[in-house]
Amino acid sequence: MRVVTTAQPLDVQPTPLALLMLGREADTGSERGVDCPGDLPSPSDPGLVERARAAKEKLGDKVFILGHHYQRDEVIQFADVTGDSFKLAKDAAARPEAEYIVFCGVHFMAESADILTSDDQAVVLPDLAAGCSMADMATAEQVAECWDVLTDAGIAEQVVPVSYMNSSADIKAFTGKYGGTICTSSNAKKALEWAFEQGEKVLFLPDQHLGRNTAVRDMGLTLEDCVLYNPHKPNGGLTVEELRAAKMILWRGHCSVHGRFSVESVNDVRARIPGVNVLVHPECKNEVVSAADYVGSTEYIINMLEAAPAGSKWAIGTELNLVQRLANRFADQDKEVVFLDKTVCFCSTMNRIDLPHLVWTLESLAEGNLVNRIEVERETEQFAKLALERMLSLP
């Protein structure tokens, strides 16, 4: 299988921060782990593709490889299925014969896969440093303290937690324990509608933008109905009166990739490409979503481009690996696909899963060595699964 290259280079320039995508540098103060036991193959090894193919063939049906849409092409070419985080976790659960689930994504995704798969299956993350900055913006301790603040304000009984799929197992467990549900960017509106049937207020974790955009854009609430809870300030930086008046209590978290897009990016691309359609992910800021033509999840973005007429022009506000892949895919259909911003916006932690890590993982498994297993503690799994099952039962 060949590695796809970009048919028409996207108009972006790399920045020093973008070099983190190489996966060779790490911030040990903020990442879960940076070392693999044993030596990684050299990225310059010309035999990496063949080594990955051979190890996968040796493992046969024992291994099932999941590839998130934001992964590099060099990794995606070996994925048995591709998709967003929840789709991939469900795909893993539907393959009980696979002894090893290799999740080419980030840590919270592997946790979700472990929650939904059987105890006989081992979920493996090729690089333990592949985390998610958004998920790490809400810790179990911070959320427990927030609930104490809501209790002291006399409103906890009115509040239903709704947590984005992009959260840790601990946060999913908190959500399940306190009667809430999980949501994806595709079903956030349904999750909020359900939550407001259960209570008067929602605590939305950890992405403020998805919560705000869904409440205001899709449900008719106002910006004044939303308050921002900052876990680094006493009482979240809010007064009791503000908490009691709010309908949406938004956690101060965001995606470091989607948060970079700006209204200036939208105005610039419209000036450069007349007639362009601006299509963005709902993790973008509210002002960016308001300035765009279309807003939707990763799957929505892909479906929109599939249905788009030949000759149409699209500026996409989401992770660059996916945008490049879509540009390649639709180039022969005369669909112009460009990145919304002029600077590189890879997800640095997603990009830690590279071909050397995948080769090391598959060769280790083929030799009978289980590496980098992701396991969720039993009680955490129980409550997190409860929250996920509530989402699955949404109409």
Image (cartoon, helix red, strand yellow):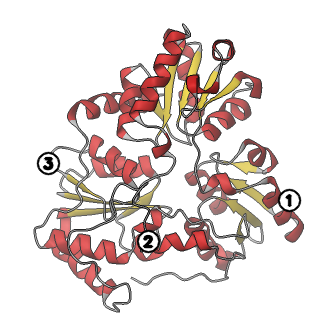
- Tell me: residue 110, above or below residue 305: above
Q: Residue at x 17, y 54 (%)?
A: 97
Image coordinates of residue 202 in percent, x first then y, are 57, 22
Give whichever of 127, 220 is nearer the camera. Answer: 127
Image coordinates of residue 82 in percent, x first then y, are 43, 61
Tag 2 near tag 1, CB within 8 Å: no
| Residue 339 occupies quadrant | bottom right
Image coordinates of residue 100 in percent, x first then y, are 21, 59
| Cα–Cα gap, marks 3 and 2 | 34 Å
| Cα–Cα gap, marks 2 and 1 | 34 Å
| Cα–Cα gap, marks 3 and 1 | 52 Å
Mark 2, secondary structure of its residue: loop
User: Which label lies toward us, 3 or 2?
Assistant: 2
Q: Which residue is mark 2?
A: 25
Image coordinates of residue 35 in percent, x first then y, are 29, 67
* Label 1 neighbour load within 10 Å: few <14, some 14-19, many 20+: some
Q: In the rendered structure, find residue 267 and report the number of the disc placed on it.
A: 1
User: Which label lies toward us, 3 or 1?
Assistant: 1
Going by the image, does 169 lie left or right of 302?
left
**Quadrant location of the N terminus in the rendered image:** bottom left
Q: Label 3 sits on what residue type?
A: Asp
Q: Label 2 sits on what residue type?
A: Glu
Going by the image, does 59 lie left or right of 91?
left
